[in-house]
Amino acid sequence: MSFKPANHIQDLQYFGEFGGVNPSISDASTYTFLSAKTMFDTFEGNADGCYLYSRHTSPSNLYLGEALAAMEGTETANVTASGMGAITAVLMQICNAGNHVISSRTIYGGTYAFLKNFTPKFNIGTSFVDITKPKLVEAAITKNTKVIFCESVSNPLLEIADLKALSAIAKRHNIKLVVDNTFSPLSISPVKLGADVVIHSLTKFINGASDTVGGVVCGTQEFIDDLRNVNDGASMLLGATMDSLRAASVLKNLRTLHIRMQQHSKNALYLAKKFESDGLKTVYPGLESHPSHELFKSQMNEEYGFGGMLTIDVGSIDLANDLMEMMQENNLGYLAVSLGFYKTLFSAPGTSTSSEIPEEEQIQMGLTNGLIRFSIGLDADIERTYNKMRDCMIALGILKNKPVTTNI
Ligand SMILES: *Cc1c(COP(=O)(O)O)cnc(C)c1O
């Protein structure tokens, strides 16, 4: 594949007001007009390049949006206050009362809760399906279906969506394919595979500093204009706007994303291979044992690898909790939700990030009690990290071999 997302970000040139190497930050909620007529035209959406009010948009937010649109290969993008601020606005924009959504059954807990518990208030129903089976997706389509929603790499089970197949189905039925690409920035470019709209939680890999929440919607100019419409745009009216100061800070972090993704992927692949050969039940798209390994390979921008997320199953929630606490005591990472940090983060999804999903549904989808989700950090010496993790697992009887280091 010839798409080079990091080049597209690199090629954007920004200067600050005084020739600064970073763009100036727009420190304003509202903007003056030289003529009353231009103000009226701006409200009507007919005055390009004029700013109105920062909930609508701001120069700093446009810079960040432009860079993320370049990354995803879309015409434009709208940044939001959080990933959920992006997801909820997109779904509310596309769907009217009586419409229907088809969603992957393994998705981020917040998205699941929104579709399961919140949108029914507006008479928007959702069918949750096994997204790895495009035939089931097509069979779930009704005359009211408006959206197929999935994650390119699903949370927390790391299932891979066949975006080309899903896009063909969406086009055949004239519905939109909306893809949450939070787990695989740069690695997967959903629009190049046929998605209509791409969403990210910037909170995770893209910002990479665990210091803020943020989100983005990447799409056509027409769709983004609709989201921002002062009369009926979901982003404008629901109001999940990113602050300009934060947009400037996320843009600076975005510039190292390609290097960080390569290191996250390299470290995660190393650990996944080691864990698997130790006999642990390990799920990582870069392992040949992953059911969608070949599919991921056929969809990826190779240089960024298979991503920083992996899971292991240690058999029970008690062992999972003991292991996570011991790894944290040994400074191998933090027992925390979220992902994409320099430090490794781990949590047990069944009792944390996916706890919105009822237990019996968790079992059905293969979300077991002993599952630990890792977001692998940027460790310079991943072999040392592995040896210490292995020692923790041996100390707890998860692995039977002798410890290889003695300093824990
Ligand atoms: C975290 C996350 C979200 C929600 O993003 P926020 O920034 O926390 O609102 C959505 N989708 C995925 C896959 C996530 O990991």
Image (tube, grey):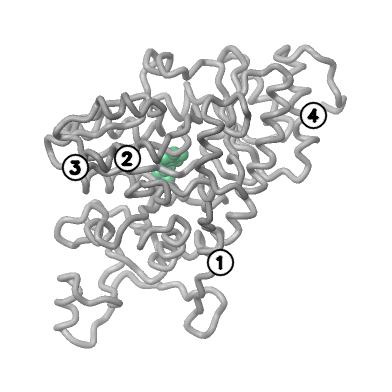
Q: Amino acid at mark 2?
A: Ala
Left or right, 126 with reference to 325: left
Residue 237 in picture, x, y percent from top left: 21, 55
Front residue (pair 203, 65): 65
Tag shown at residue 10: 1
Whichever of labels 4 and 2 marks the residue nearer the N terminus, that label is: 2
Q: Secondary structure at mark 4?
A: helix
- Whether 16 is drawn above or below 235: the answer is below
Ligand 1 rendered quadrant? top left
Instruction: Give how far apart the Cα atoms at labels 4 and 2 are.
Output: 45 Å
Residue visible at 70% across and 24% down in the picture: 275
- Cα distance, mark 1 to mark 3? 36 Å
Residue that carries the numbered disc 2 in the rendered image: 168
Using the numbered discs, state the Cα–Cα distance from disc 3 to disc 4 in whole angstroms: 50 Å
Which amino acid does the dot numbered 3 rest on?
A: Cys
| Farthest-out residue, bottom | 34
Percent x, y for residue 17?
A: 47, 83
Label 2 residue SS: helix
The nearer-to-camera label among 3 and 4 is: 3
User: Mark 2 or 3, which is nearer the eye?
Assistant: 2
Q: Is mark 1 within 8 Å of ligand 1?
A: no
Nearest to N terminus: mark 2 or mark 3: 3
Label 4 environment density (alpha carbons within 10 Å; few <14, some 14–19, many ≥20): some
Which tag, 3 or 4, sits closer to the chain's start? 3
The C terminus, quarter of image: top right
- Nearer-N-terminus badge (1/4): 1
